[in-house]
Each structure stands twice: as structure tokens, then as C-alpha cells.
Amino acid sequence: MLKKLLILAALAAVMATYFGFGLGQYLTFDGMKAAVAGWDAFYSENPAVVLAAFFLAYVAVTAASLPGAAIMTLAAGALFGLVVGTVLVSFASTLGAGLAFLSARYVLRDGLEARFGERLRSINAGMERDGVFYLFSLRMIPVVPFFVVNLVMGLTRLPFVTFLWVSQVGMLLGTIVYVNAGTQLARIDSLSGIASPALLASFALLGIAPWLAKLVIGALRARRAYAGFDRPKRFDRNLVVIGAGAAGLVSSYIAATVKAKVTLVEAGAMGGDCLNTGCVPSKALIKSAKVAQQMRRADRYGIAPVRPRVPFRDTIERVRDVIRAIEPHDSIERYEGLGVDVVQGYARILDPWTIEIARTDGTTQRLTTRSIILATGAEPVVPPIPGIETSGYLTSETMWDAFARMDEVPRRLCVLGGGPIGCELAQAFARLGAEVTLIEQADRLLGREDAEVSELAAAVLEEAGVRVLTGHTAARFEQGMVIAERAGDELRVAYDALIVAVGRRPRLAGFGLEELGIAGEGEGVLSTDGLLATRFPNIFAAGDVAGPYQLTHVASHQAWYAAVNALFGHLKKFTADYRVIPQVTFLDPEFARVGINEREAEAKGIAYEVTRYAIDDLDRAIAESEMRGFVKVLTQPGKDRILGVTIVAAHAGELLAEYVLAMKHGLGLNKILGTIHSYPTFAEANKFAAGQWKLARKPEKLLKMVEKYHAWRRG
């Protein structure tokens, strides 16, 4: 406590001196010019005194995070010249930064760790692993103000000595550039002097310094990453893509389009999980289930209801027909026709530029390549629950083959997991006639959504006949039975088929990633930067293996960035943009969202206003007896800027597209309100939601004045 008080007292004294004596006036361009002119003669007579005073003043300004360090750096060049000024500022800035670092550490860190301990633990783990390089990058490329870097680093567990030497080295280039500019400023006698070649050259150097620093950092990063590997003198390919799911297909398509020589390696079926076991087959099954439900509920449309007969083998065969109809879009023949070298086999990365492929024909092929894109996808997570290995469980990948051998829908189906996949399958199979029990460990379904969305999802499932058990943990399996626990009580759930849908994890094993040191931590995604590059600048990742979203359209979105950076990153780099990501859970009605919801806004401390429009007011919804749901829009307080949208409605996925476009291009609710929407359509819900927003903000005082005006006009 005493240490904190002493630090605070010292900082208060420095700030009181700075503001009390108006020292800030000297830390401006004009003030600096005047001060330099006055101190120049004194410096020639008393160099040691001036050097010491300047050094201490610089340390004080930096330690207290006061404005003016850049001006003082220029002044050092003007007073002392390039060499002496650089040495003086280099050590003074490092010492001042170190004091600011210690101030933050001793005054703030303990309190922050007590409040945000869990979050800071992950940050400190990252700092322990890459802290030196991260700090060096911040020092070399001053995107973040140095005083902010000093304070933030003090809140981490970075060693003090490490902070000092990295700061000393990292700030040296910028110090030299600024001091050199100061030497030229000292020679300006009039405005015409600003146009002197030497001064212009100094400012040009200031402008390109960050770019030079970026190049240096890139070179150092590459040197560090590639240490111990021999780079080939020539390459067989410009790009090798591993995995032919959404990310792999788009990556290779882009490479072929720009005439790069690209090889696409896939061990299984082209199209990946989405085509063969995920998006496509599940949506085909959902449609069949919806038709069965409409037959049961035909009285809603003035038609006599009937109990549907579900020949399950035929239902699954239709699902396979849908897959076969879409397969040509992702086929080997199509991609080879586009110019992609498609290889069926298992790829293994031997070094950052060499791929070994165990081809399915029994041969082995080695290729050297400038860049690699990992698009290996994800696989279902199977939790280590006692008895699960003998439970006969199915996953989203294995269930299609198993169901294709069944003549009837499983009489009793148990689904583990209340996320999007579990909820979609539970409703679909219940509508097809199965007795479905869904077990979810959390207290509600769709845990990332708002509470009202979770409640509505549970109601929709229960309406379909699903037995929803939230807050239950699958404790163990016995023969044809799962024992679920809640608050110490056991519940036995019998099943004829069991689907495990508790999540998916990146597919990382067998590609040589462990040997290269780029495998994900535990079951996590690969660590990539904003360019989607791994620790090796020429090895990229896209899709489920890269995160942060396990969505087909995000995989395709990432593939563009990965491919362009892999092929043209030496010329121009592009940072992946995740600002506007739509996502849909294909229940009936559909649950769609883009941007933040209320739960996330509150967790992040983001201020927002809510506008809500109920679908049961929409003419088209009434005409189709699809009146369940709402449109909920979060906007910036007092403005029409859209922060996020949640839609629960029939065709919600299609309705969401208008908001995705608006958010992507900065269009607000006023623009949506001013757009003509066809009548009668579900899309009108978006316009009516914008109308609700406008109505809630009508100018009451102005309207009263207008009312009086109309009364006057009537006489």
C-alpha cells in the first residue's frame, strides 16, 4: 500500500508541476522553437547541465504519460544533433517507459486481476508465449501510442527487464527518424525553409518509417519461423490446398482463376462436410419433416389433415438424391476443368514448403509449394462419458449411412446437445414420427442467443413433441439407456438411436502440424493472425480449422482472404473482416441473427436501444398461418445505426439478408424505411420494424405545432 501511495504521490507531483507552471506551452512546435533558440547558447557553455536537465525532463514526461514526448524528441535533434540526441532520447525514453510500466503494475494490476482474473490469465499466457515479439512489433510500428503500450504492458506478467531491452531496441528506429527530423527543423529561419530538401527528406523518412519497420518485423518474423528449414530454390506449385470443403474449394477456385498453379488434396468426398453430411442433407431432411408436419396440420389451411406415412428408407434416399444433384458443383471434373490439379489422397506437411501426398491409388507424391492453405474442416466431438463407446452412438457424420439401412424412423431417439445441430435434428425427427428426447447440460437451448430466443426454441421443439431436458448432464450409458443427472437426481432415458451433437472440433491430426508446431492448443482452432496465416507466413488456414465461426459461408469468406494473401501477400495484404456475420438455425420457424444481441451487448457494456416488430402483425404471415416470431433490431442510442438483428420467423434466413447488406455498407433503418418492399411479402417485416423505430422517435412538439397549423387552416 505504501508503495502505491508513493508512486501516486510522485505522479501527482510531476503533473502538478507540469500543469501548474504551464510547461505544456513549451511542448508545442512554436514553444520548442523558442526554447531551443534560448537554450542553444546555454548548452554550448554548460553541456553537462543541459544534457542532465533534458534527460530528467524527458524521463518525467514519459513516466507520467504526459503529452509532448514527440516534440521533445525533435528538440533533442535540434539541440544536440543526431548522434547525441539519439543516445539521449533512446535511454531517457526507455527509462521513462519503464517507470510508467512499473506504475501501472504496482498501482493497477492487482485490482484488475482480482476483477478480470480469468480474462487476464489467457492474455498473460499469450504474453508468455509471444510477448517479446508482440511488444517489439508495437514499438516498431507505432499504431498504438507508446504511453498506452507502457501502461498496458505493466498490467501483464511480462518481466520488467524484458520490457526494458525490447523497448530500447524496438524504439531505436523511430527515435533516429524523429531526432533526424529535429536536426533539420533547427535550420529553419523562415517559412521558405520548410521546403528545404533536407527537411522534406526527414519528414518523408518519418512517413515511411512505419512501413520500413513493418518490413523489418516481417523479415524478423519469417527468419524466426523458418529457422532450421531449407527453402527450396524452385517450387512445383504456387499453392497447395488441403481439404475440399467450402474453404478448400473456394481457395483453389480463386487460385485457378488468377492462373496460379494449384493442387487441391482431398482424402474423402469432394464438398466436405457441408455437402455430404452437414448443411445439405440436414436441410433436405428438415424439408421432408416440414411436409410431414403440414400434412398433420393441414386443417390450418382449410384442408383435411392426414397422418403421414414415412417410409424412412425413401426419405433418406431423397436426401441422397439432393446430395447427388448438388455434387457436380463440387466435383473433381468441374475443378479440373477450371484448372485445379485435384489429387485424391492424404496430405502431410513435411516442412513449410513441402507436401507429401499418400494417394489413394497407392503411390506417393511430393510437391514443393510457395504457399499452403489448411482447410481440413472439423469433426464431431464425442465426450468421454462412461459407456459411450458401446452405446451405439451416431454423429452428424455417421448417422446418414446408419439411417439409410433403416426401413422405419427410430421409435425412440435421444439427442445429446442443445445447440443448432441438436435442435434442428430433434425437431425434424420428431416431425417424422420419432419419440425424441433432447438432453442439454446448460440451463437453456441455443446458449449464445437471448433468453427469449432460447425459450421460444424450447417451445417450438416441445410443440413438435420433443422432450426437452435442459440442465441435465449425461452421466453414463447402459444398454440402450442414457442416465441423465440433475441436482443429484437420476433420470433414465431409453433409446433406439442416439445422436451426439455437443459440438465440433478442428480436424488437425495426421497433417504434420504437430511436428511444425502449428497444431491447435488442446482441441482449439489453429492460431492465425488477421491475414489467416499461421506462425509460418506462407501457411494459412481457413474454415472450421481456423475459427472463430463454424459456418460454411464464413469458410468461403475466409477462403478469399487466405487465397489472396497466399498468392499476393508479398504485394498487398488483406485482413479478414468478421464485422458482419449472419447465422441461421434452421428450426421451423427459423432463428436468424447478425451482429450482436442483447446478451452480448450487455456483456460487452455496449449501449443500445431495442426496436421490436411482431410477425403476427404481418399480412403475408397471417395469409400463410406463419405468425410466430418477431424482428428485433438493436441500434445505437439516438441513431439509426444497426448494431445487431435477431429474427425468428418463417424464412428468417432470407429476411436477414437485407440487414446484412445494410450493416456491411453502413446503411441505417431510415434507408430501409425509405425502400419500397413488395406487398405482400415477408420482407415487409424489415420495413415495418424500421417504421416502429421511427414511430418511437416521432417529434411530438413539432407534431403539436403542425396540428395547430392544420386547425388554423380549417378556420
Image: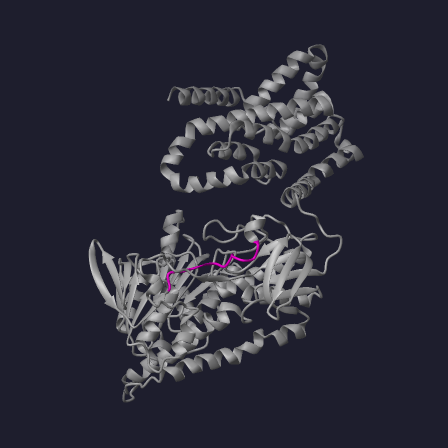
Q: Position of residue 678 (x, y in %)?
A: 46, 77
341 or 153, nearer to the observer? 341
Residue at the spot x=47%, y=22% of the render? 11
* Closer to the camera in the image, 502 or 511: 511
- The quarter holding residue 187 reads top right
Look at the image and say whether residue 241 sits in the magenta stretch.
no
Q: Residue at x 36, y 35 (%)?
A: 114
Q: Residue at x 63, y 50 (%)?
A: 537
Q: Is residue 347 left or right of residue 79?
A: left
Looking at the rendering, in which quadrant would you find the C terminus?
bottom left
Residue 121 x %, y %: 43, 40
Question: Please, is residue 526 above or below residue 29 in the view?
Answer: below
Q: Is residue 665 left or right of residue 616?
A: right
Hey, which quadrant is residue 235 in on the image? bottom right
Q: Is residue 292 above or below residue 569?
A: below
- Which residue extends farthest right? 197
Quarter of the image with the N terminus is top left
Q: Relative to residue 247, is residue 331 depicted above or below?
A: below
610 sits left or right of 534 in the view: left
Prevailing secondary structure class for the magenta stretch in the rendered image: loop
From this viewpoint, which residue is outermost toward the front? 362
In magenta segment, residue 503: yes
Q: Nearer the viewer, residue 191 or 556?
A: 556
Q: Is residue 41 visible?
A: yes
Q: Going by the picture, which residue comes out furthest to the left?
A: 489
Q: Splitting the image into 4 quarters, where does residue 692 fall?
A: bottom left
Q: Position of residue 165 (x, y in %)?
A: 59, 28
Where are the magenta residues, as a range? 501-512
